[in-house]
Each structure stands twice: as structure tokens, then as C-alpha cells.
Amino acid sequence: MKNVYTVTQVNSYIRNMFTQDFMLNALYVKGEISNCKYHSSGHIYFTLKDRGGTIACVMFAGNRAKLRFRLEEGMQVIVSGTVDVYERDGKYQLYAKEITADGAGDLYVRFEQLKRELEEMGMFAPEYKQPIPKYIRTLGVVTAPTGAAVQDIINITRRRNPYVQVILYPAIVQGEQAAQSIVNGIRMLEKMGVDVMIVGRGGGSMEDLWAFNEREVAQAVFDCSVPVISAVGHETDTTMIDYVSDLRAPTPSAAAELAVYDVRECLHRLNELSEALSRRMRTQLEWKRMKLSGYEAHMKSTSPMRRIMDQRNRTVAMEERMMSAMEKCLTGNKHRSQLYAQRLRGVSPLEKFGQGFSYVSDKNDCAVTDVHAVTVGDNVKIHVKNGILKAEVTELEYLEREKAFGEVKEER
């Protein structure tokens, strides 16, 4: 009967073979760094390659302390370590213990040379960078029609602003035809008049991203009249269009966030402005209302009818004061008249008549106040309280003083 082994047994057997091979336990491998990733745990994962093949490599955090430089895409290095099998995946890889630089790889040299040339031509100058419009209606995307990059861009655009139209140019982003396909996509979307353009793809090795390092692609991005956002690979990946584009985004998702304004923020801002405007309008209306009330009161106080009313009120008030003064004056005069009447009554001859007094007048109605004014036989009138008595003087009788006075007169 044939022997049947488990996968684990086979992988373990192969691992033992690698372990027993003295050369694989301590060897130096020369190659070019590609697809390098620094993990949060401190480990470094990368691929070492040459013209004939590739080998997966890992440097654990414990050995990283010996590394005196940062690994970059395209660097030519010599890796000292052990080749062993990772039993869980059934894959062998080079476990690096030491890494020394051995010059730059071919792609890295080409990249640096083209970068210097384009920089000398002024294609990286900030004065040529176009501002990214804040509010857009159409977003052009030059990338592969499948993959996570285009889906991330579409999803984020729909979430931030569903009113923005996304126009995709399905470009080839890897291989010999990639550069021309990307250039055609940039020119096509420029003719369509999109507001902003995103040019990019997902992550990969330097070879996978090389189409975005070609001169014609960089020239097309520089010549494009539409603002271009580059979004190639991950945050650590750098390509030539990152320097030439108007804005670099670390990832395609970040490019969508930079290109598309969040409509929720816009609506929130509009609500804030609307509330502020309403408050200002209410304040202004209240102030205008108060001012209008003041004008209305002023107009009422200065209107002809108001003046007539004021004059009428003043006239009525003056009339009342005059009547009051007249009544007061009449009352005073009345009191004085009564006093005067009482006084006159006290000296009135008629009042004296009531007390038994009378007076005598001669025939000419002249009052007789002296006995010498009449003679015996004259007719006189005696006035009493209720009439006149007519009499004749029959005798004159003098008082003693008058007699003496009369005798003196006769002697003289």
C-alpha cells in the first residue's frame, strides 16, 4: 500500500532538508529591492530580484537594529541570512540578518535620472501647479476598470457628494502598453472638460508602478489644462507624476476625499449661514421696527392734526385757567361788595329812618340843617321812613349855644 502524507508532514520534511543544507544556513544574496514594506510590528518585508527571478525576504525587528539605512525601491543590496521554509504557507523565503548597500538598481537609476531632467526643465516648479477647485460637478478618473482603487474612488465620491458625476477612463496601468493608455486617458478626459482628474492605481512593486514614471506620462500630466491629482500606490510609494501633478494624494481613497467636497459639510455650513442670516434679519427687522415706531411717534407729534390738537388742548387749558381766575376774581369782588354793602348800610340815611330818624327839606327840596335857614311861616317837608310830611314853620327855637352865638352877632 502506498504511503500517504499530510501537507504538514511534507512541509516539515522540506524544512528539515533546508535546515540540513549548510549553504542555505549562511549565504549572501545580491539583488534589487522591490515591493518593500515596513510593518507596524517592526519587521521588514521585501522582494529581492534580478533579471532571472525573485525571492521573498523578511528581516525581523530584532535584526533591524543593525540596518544603517532605509530600504528603498530599486536599491541594489547584498543580503546575508538563511533560506528556510514557512511551514504554514509552504513557501520558502530568505530570512535576512544583515543588509548592506551595493549601489542602485537599474530602475532606480533611471528614475533618479529622469527626475533630475524634469526638475531642470521646471516641471516640478510650484508656480505651474493649478489649484484644485473646491466644488466640482464632474470627476475624471484614469485607472484600471477593475480593482480596489476605482471602487474606493467611486464609493467615497458617492458618500461625500452623490451629485458629482464620475467619468472613468479604463486605462491599462501595468505593462508595455500602460504608458500610452494612461496618456490617452488624460487627453480624452481633458477634452471632455472634467473639473478635476485623478490619475493612479493601487499599490505594487516598482516594476508594477513603472508606467507612471515614464516621460510621456509625466509630460501629459504637466501639459493637462485640468487640475490633476496623482494617486499611485500606497503612501510610501513615489512616482514621477507625484512631482509633476498639481496635488499628490497618498492613496486613491485620499485622492477622492481631496477632490470631492463633502456635501454634508456644505449643507451644515449652509444651515449655519441660514441661521446666522435669519438672526441678522430678525435683529435688523426689530431695529427697523423700533426706528419706524420712533418716526411714527415723531410724525404724530409734528403732524398738523397733532398741532391743532395741542393748540386746542392749550386753548381749553387757558380757558379753564381764565374761567377759574374769573370765578376767583368775581368771588373776591362779591365778598368785597358784600363788605362794602354792609358798610354802606351802616351809614345809609334810610337805615337811620328805620331807627326813628328823619330829615327836613325846604320848598326847593334842599335839606334844612340849620334853624336859620327857615323863617316862621315857611312850608317845609319832613321825610320819614315811609313817606313825607308837609308842615308850616310856626316857631323857631334856638339852642342855648345858638342863642349866645346869635347875641354876639347882633352886638357886632
Image (spheres, rainbow, N blue to C red):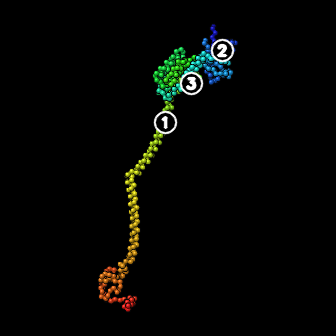
Q: In this view, does 289 lie above or below 151?
A: below
Q: Distance between the residues labelled 2 and 3?
A: 32 Å
Identify the secondary structure beneath mark 1: helix
Q: Whole-percent x and y of residue 349?
A: 36, 79
Q: In this view, does 103 lie above or below 285?
A: above
Residue type, label 3 = Pro
The numbered disc on residue 273 is: 1
Q: Whole-percent x and y of residue 337?
A: 39, 71
Identify the secondary structure beneath mark 2: strand
Picture quadrant of residue 394: bottom left
Q: Is residue 266 above or below residue 396?
A: above
Front-lying residue, 395 or 110: 110
Q: Which of marks 2 and 3 is nearer the N terminus?
A: 2
Q: Distance between the residues labelled 1 and 2?
A: 65 Å
Q: Classify residue 212 as left or right of residue 65.
A: left
The numbered disc on residue 29 is: 2
Q: From this viewpoint, is residue 231 visible?
A: no
Dot 2 and dot 3 residues touching (CB under 8 Å): no
Q: How crowded is mark 3: few (under 14 residues within 10 Å), some or many (20 or more)?
A: some
Q: In this view, does 307 lie above or below 110?
A: below
**Residue name at image x 30 percent, y 82 percent:** 364
Q: Whole-percent x and y of residue 367?
A: 33, 82
Identify the secondary structure beneath mark 3: loop
Residue that numbered label 3 is attached to: 250
